[in-house]
Image (cartoon, helix red, strand yellow):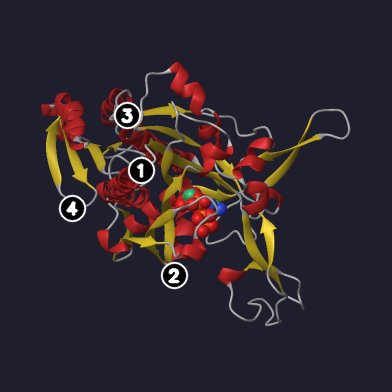
Amino acid sequence: MDLMEKIVSLCKRRGFVYPGSEIYGGIQGFWDYGPLGVELKNNIKKLWWKSMVHERDDVVGLDAAIIMNPSVWEASGHTQAFTDPLVECKSCHHRFRVDEVSEKCPDCGGPFTEPKTFNLLTEVYLGSTEPKQKAYLRGEITQGVFINFKNIVDSSRVEIPFGIAQIGKAFRNEITPGNFNFRSREFEQMELEFFVKPEEAEGQKWLDYWKQQRLDWYLGFGINKDNLRLREHAPDERAHYARLAFDIEYNSPFGWKEFEGIHHRGNWDLSRHKVTYQNYTPWVIETSGGVDRAALFFLIDSYSEVGDRVILKLHPQLAPYKVAVFPLVANKPDLAKKAREIYLQLKLKLPTVWDDRGNIGKRYYTQDEIGTPWCVTVDYQTLEDGTVTVRDRDTAQQERVSVTQLDSYFSKKLK
Ligand code: ATP
């Protein structure tokens, strides 16, 4: 099995990610997150929000509607320019993004048509009277920020330079969804639009600043630095709104791929929506990351094998469960009772999981595979001196810790 097959299988088996609508044969480009996947994604979003909003005094948050007046997408240029070039195989009629295939159809070897542009916006129809009103599921969460720019300036105390952060679902009718959840048709974005004075030096300063901040954020949560790089877009590669664009790329099993985009959007959006600030149109520096891609790349980057054991070395802050608690043996009532007590006490403070199946070795194996950083074992000594064994996922080292100290022991480790 190659690495991607291992990741996909682990995700399904352990409850991170399932194929969407699986019992009906699936639906291409949609994924469902299971009990562990939703925890991982929530942790990514929570940590992003903490660093982008709560720890700063120049960024505020927003949660705009997914469906907006279709005029928004006219003004933003998306109905016209939010396109990918598409080719169709003349023999089997399968369609592909030009930049993802070579000369011949990968499915049957047939020749391609000339490329034509394909709009990625997903249409929806609203209302009960015919003709129904056509609208779009948002193709990027960004526009919700620009159309609320004035509301936010008027209703809060922000002053330029400042940013508006948002996390939410976006939808793209991707021609070739694939590489697991790397390219889906429904996905979540985490974005910052940072508004600055329209001056070259100011734009450059904040572009450099945000590039570094976002790189550091991924490195801080454990991505191996050799697997991250910044790549500048060539002029013909830039989206229709971008003056300058950089991608933070990840060295994935399917090549160097975009993790997050850092874009200098200039005054494109605000001027298209005819929005100003005082007497000028601010410029925008954007950081636009994908929550699903982050989840995937964190999983890939943390995957390791020692013999036949799999260890997900997820940063403890990202791990779905922080602690697993078990009795040394399941069939001794006094051990089980004590372990249960400790489990319920820890669960009030931290995402904690209970496991009393199989033997200790097997439970460690399971917890390593889902990335739980610490396992607490309650044994006979616990009943005598009130201490438990805490085993560390990455070093497999064990130490005795007093039950009364467990809370502070883990909160220190999680700092
Ligand atoms: P690509 O070149 O891969 O299609 P893009 O340049 O169109 O991506 P942006 O419009 O810059 O992507 O979107 C910002 C971020 O949103 C991306 O860096 C990525 O993390 C995420 N994203 C975009 N499209 C998808 C998708 N189809 N599935 C999952 N995440 C996506």
Q: Residues within 10 Å of mark 2 (few under 14, many from 20)?
A: few
Q: Mark 3–mark 2 contact, CB under 8 Å? A: no
Which residue is disc 4 drawn over? 395
Between the C-alphas of marks 3 and 1, the distance is 19 Å
Residue lying furthest right? 130
Q: Nearer the viewer, mark 3 or mark 2?
A: 3
- The alpha-carbon separation of the residues under discs 1 and 2 comes to 49 Å
Disc 1: CA contacts within 10 A as few (<14), some (14-19) or many (>=20):
few
Crowd band around label 4 with a 10 angstrom C-alpha radius: few (<14), some (14–19), many (20+): few
| Element class at badge 2 | loop
Q: Is residue 181 visible?
A: no
Mark found first going from the N terminus, 3 or 2: 2
Q: Label 3 neighbourhood size at 10 Å, few (<14), some (14-19), many (20+)? A: some
> N-terminal of the two: label 2 or label 4?
2
Circle 3: element type:
loop
* Amino acid on which the number 4 mark rests in the picture: Thr
Instruction: Looking at the picture, tell me which residue is in the foreground, 3 or 279.
Output: 279
Quadrant of the rendering where the C terminus is positioned: top left
Q: Which mark is residue 58?
A: 3
At which x and y percent is residue 311? 31, 55
Q: CA distance from mark 2 to mark 4?
A: 26 Å
Query: In front of the other: label 3 or label 1?
Result: 1
Label 3 or label 1, whichever comes before in sequence order: 3
Give the label on residue 2, or none.
Answer: 2
Marks 3, 4: nearer the viewer: 3
Q: In this orientation, which residue lies closer to the viewer: 180 or 371?
A: 180
Residue 297: which quarter of the image? bottom left
Residue 39 in the figure: left or right of residue 305? right
Rendered position, 341 above or below 301: above
Q: Is residue 367 left or right of residue 92?
A: left
Q: Nearer the viewer, residue 201 or 253?
A: 201
